Image (tube, helix red, strand yellow):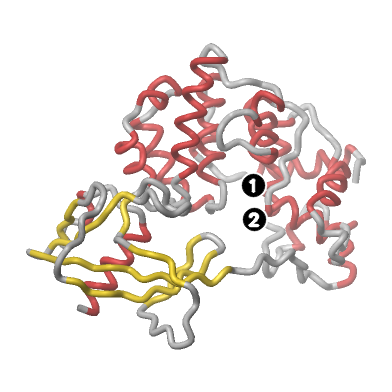
Amino acid sequence: MKDQLVTNKILKWYDINKRSLPWRKNVSKQKRQYYTLVSEFMLQQTQVATVIPYFNRFIKIIPSLEILAKIQNKKLIKLWEGLGYYSRARNLKKTAQVVIKNFKGKLPNNFEDLISLPGIGNYTASAILAIAFNKPYIPLDGNIERILKRYLYLKKDNEIHKDNLIQKKSIFGTSSRSSDYAQALMELGALICKPTNPLCNQCPISKKCKSLKKKDFDLTKNIKKNIDKYFLLKVYKRDQKYLLIKNTKFNFLKNLTIFPMEELSKQKNFNENLNLKLSNMNMIIKIQYLKNSEKFHTPYWIDEKKLDNYMLPTFTKKIVKYLERNL
């Protein structure tokens, strides 16, 4: 697949079929770098269609690294509300501050400096170098992994291991259009080599695809098991308002606003009220309704009818909606 003809086929397909995405706009180099940084943070564990409206609103209100570095945390989290994984937003701001302080306000264009920034790992660094700086990197996202697995018919555990996939991606070769090529491969996975029902008849590299020859498109995945955890959630309500606290106790939703809660060891007869998934954790929750509020650190009360007025994680909103349906 190192054949330049194949590379050209993928780029030709991309030029005709690429989606019009807001972070792909024809803007100055500085804006392109900023757009890439913001979009890559948002796209971590989140689909493109979900990210688009958040990105547009974010860029409109925070149009530069300088403004991002100084934005109030409350305003930042409010803009991020609904995207989840709020540590991404906090790390994005920290990265802006480090870039302003240590790199004269310019996003670094080398791998070592990029991965030293908060919230930037190997994948995000590779994506930024390719897309923003046109360097010959191929970021291994889920879309490109899928193409690799199918094109080479990788099924065994050792074959689909991350380290092996990183080595195998070299079969894609390189292009002087590194920015477009990285995005072309991602786009090919997203639009054509889809998780189910791939559109092989529209794929520019299908002739040498081993999965197509075998008529077997099933993907083998390294399965991460979800962890079951048990919680007692305390509900205090007065005058149509709920008591919430700032979360300084749990690693999830750190420093965000949640109901008072405590983790419990598994009980034989755990009478759960609801089950919510957060990252790779199944939160099995039992609700306790209480009258006399304890003394909590930084408590405050929210009006159940005015949820949009508050900076709340989706997790907390789901709890409120459940309570409103079941009280």
Q: Residue at x 38, y 48 (%)?
A: 248
Marker disc for residue 186: none
Choose top left, top right, bottom left or bottom right for residue 116. top right
Q: Residue at x 29, y 61 (%)?
A: 259
Location of residue 40 with respect to 291 vertically, above or below = above
**Nearer to me, 259 or 54:** 259
Is disc 2 in contact with disc 1, using a CB cutoff of under 8 Å?
yes
311 horizontally vs 33: left or right: left
Q: Please, is residue 152 above or below residue 100 in the view?
A: below
Q: Which residue is mark 2?
A: 191
The residue that mark 1 highlights is 17
Residue at left offset 68%, top offset 54%: 142
Categorize mark 1 by other alpha carbons within 10 Å: few (<14), some (14-19), many (20+).
few
| Residue 306 in the image, given as x and y percentages of width and height | 17, 56
What kind of residue is marked 2?
Leu
Nearer to us in this view, 275 or 144? 275
Between marks 2 and 1, how big is the CA–CA gap?
Answer: 9 Å
Residue that appears at 86% across and 51% down? 164
Helix, strand or loop at label 1? It is: helix
Does the image show residue 243? yes
Q: Residue furthest left?
A: 239
Q: Residue furthest front?
A: 295
Residue lying at the far top of the rendered structure: 104
Check the image and report above or below for 17 versus 124: below
Residue 5 lies left or right of residue 194; in this view the side is right
